[in-house]
Image (tube, rainbow, N blue to C red):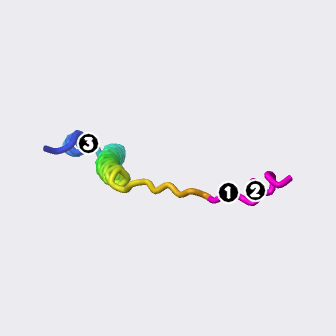
Amino acid sequence: MPTQAALDIVNALFAGQKDLSDYVAQGMSDAAMSAIDAKKVEVGKSFMASQEEDDEEEEETPEVETEQPESEEETDDETD
């Protein structure tokens, strides 16, 4: 099924209009926006899929808590 912009170009051509630049520009703009929107959806899906994988990895990896030794300042205060 042709796009509306393509139909407008064909209709203008057969109507005898010689300047089709407005129709072509609109058609190219519509095609570009459609391609950009499709790419946004694709990137969004892959981003969400990678987020889900990262969340699953974080749940599987246990957090390790480390104890930090007391600093010398704390022990010096006790001898004063």
Q: Residue at x 30, y 46 (%)?
A: 41
Magenta residues? 69-80
Q: Nearer the viewer, mark 3 or mark 2?
A: 2
Where residue 43 sits: x, y (%)?
33, 52
For the residues labelled 3 and 2, the Cα–Cα distance comes to 80 Å
The residue singled out by tag 2 in the image is 75
Decide: marks 1, 3 in contact (CB < 8 A)? no
Q: Residues within 10 Å of mark 2 (few under 14, many from 20)?
A: few
Where residue 76 sits: x, y (%)?
80, 57
For the residues labelled 2 and 1, the Cα–Cα distance comes to 8 Å
The residue singled out by tag 1 in the image is 70
Q: Nearer the viewer, residue 21 or 58?
A: 58
Mark 3 residue type? Ala
For marks 3 and 2 on the same chain, the one whose residue lies earlier in the sequence: 3
Which secondary structure class fits the magenta region best? helix
The residue singled out by tag 3 in the image is 5
Q: Residue at x 17, y 45 (%)?
A: 2
* Residue 52 visible within the image: yes
Where residue 39 sits: x, y (%)?
32, 51
Residue 9: name its quadrant: top left
Q: Secondary structure at mark 2?
A: helix
Mark 1 residue type? Glu
Q: Residues within 10 Å of mark 3 (few under 14, many from 20)?
A: some
Q: Nearer the viewer, mark 1 or mark 3?
A: 1
Q: Is residue 74 found inside the magenta-colored segment of the image?
A: yes
